[in-house]
Amino acid sequence: MAQGHTIPLLYLARLLQQRHVSVTIFTTPANSPSIRATLRNTAIPIIELDFPQNVDGIPPGVENTDKLPSLFLFPQFAKATKLMQPQFEKVLEELRPVISCIISDAFLGWTQDSAAKLDIRRIGFYGMSGFATTMYEILSKQRPQALITSLDEPFCIPDFHRLSLTRNDFVPPFSELEPKGPMVEFMIEQNMAMAKSYGMIVNSFYEIESGYIDYWNRHMGPKALCIGPLCMAKPPVLLAEEFEKPKWRLWLDEKMKNGEQVLYVAFGTQAEVSEEQLLEIAEGLEQSNANFLWVTKSKSLEILEGFEKRAKNRGIIVREWVDQMEILRHKSVKGFLSHCGWNSVTESICAGVPILAMPFMAEQHLNARLVAEELGIGLRIMPINGSVRGFVKWDEVEKRVRELMEAREGEEIRKKMKKVAEAASGAIREGGSSWQTLDQLVYDVMNYST
Ligand code: UDP
């Protein structure tokens, strides 16, 4: 699927390997190089399955959703992955004597059928927070939004009465009153496969989501296994790479030497941000006077060129793939203007960097709520229309950047983030909550006899 799904699964592979569990990765030829790069220094074998060609609307060579020309092609993409099932099962059958468990992306529900055929346990991975996963489940099963005609009218969540959400916190078609269409059918299929699975790994840690994880395990299923934040298992930068520091790293080092603080800006790999919105964010950053490092692969890059020139040495725009964890862990980085993809949120937590939440799509609006309202580790940037979804003006960006980087609000949030970051590293350390859950999982899977 997307990098945001793949990267944490690869970190999980490292964790399993550290527990002396042998891991084999199944992928496709186009995805293989980046997987090899992430798994550098490990002896984890990779098996490549051919990705089907000539599938309706999917350009040749596009083998993950980051590369899709439009997310409208997602249902066709998902269908294409399913065509790999016979190849997958053939290899699986050969490996059957040594396989105890399949861990697969939640959007590859067909792997559950393959696992069942061979009597192997399958564990699904959504890559969402426990909060978002639980809210989506409540919305689709209990439908508290059923009579709410306005997209912005708050409604209460059953069993979580202090929570009030709007339909705009969810993505279309799920935010619609009568969701239907290929995406809804696809999700129903995936959820049915997930319900039959042995468990569901949540890339989070119990200490920040206990209420939602406990609720899921009491009322929903399959059992949620909170094993995270997985970014803690990211390998350190290699010494050889240290000698070839990229431009952004040299720039950050210089800022650190001068005792200056930097705001990191990035909106992930999937969100399509309009030109108008990009310019408004640029204007807000310009007015805020903050130093910034903005990573973007937007197709409309040239419109930001004038802005970058005006910023002089106050900011840089980076167009290539970066090591986001390395940026967040850099001592000069004191804030993250983020779309709130769940990986970005957990990476910011691991690095102890407070967040300016500016969500665009998927479950990012719910993550933004978790960050700003539930955990108090960030500030929300709000659209002009008073809704949680919509166009954000430059003056709102300027105001929130100043609050986070210069004002008392920022100080408070920083303190809370420090505590949450400590809890995160405690969870994944030996004896911590995530460490114990992983240990139990390995024990259960290894002792399962067919
Ligand atoms: N990422 C990265 N370098 C980049 C862009 C993205 O390392 O130049 C990583 C980032 O650290 C995160 C993932 O890609 O692990 C993006 O996942 P996230 O859930 O934050 O957002 P998505 O891309 O799924 O919207």
Image (cartoon, rainbow, N blue to C red):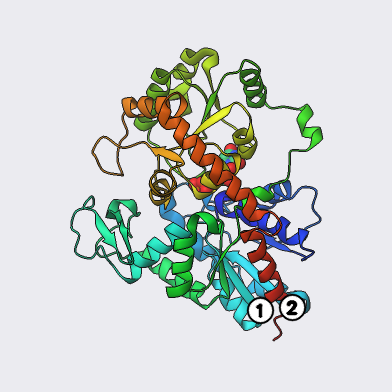
Label 1: which residue?
120
Q: Amino acid at mark 2?
A: Arg
Tell me the quarter of the image containing the N terminus: bottom right
For mark 1, give the secondary structure.
loop
- What mark, if any, has residue 316 been given in the picture? none
Q: Is residue 277 above or below residue 247?
A: below
- Disc 1/disc 2 C-alpha distance (Å): 8 Å
At x 46%, y 36%, the residue is 413
- The quadrant of the image that shows the C terminus is bottom right
Measuring from the top left, give residue 229's x and y in whole percent: 60, 52
Disc assigned to residue 96? 2
Q: Where residue 105 appears, x then y in whole percent?
A: 57, 63
Residue 70: horizontal and vertical position, in percent?
A: 44, 48
148 sits left or right of 89 in the view: left
Q: Is mark 2 within 8 Å of ligand 1?
A: no
Left or right position of 393 against 336: left
Among numbered discs 1 and 2, the one appearing first in the sequence: 2
Residue at horizontal 24 percent and vertical 40 percent from the top? 386
Is 440 situated left or right of 98 in this image? left
Residue at 33% x, 60% y: name it: 174
Query: Mark 1–mark 2 contact, CB under 8 Å?
Result: yes
Foreground tag (1 vs 2): 1
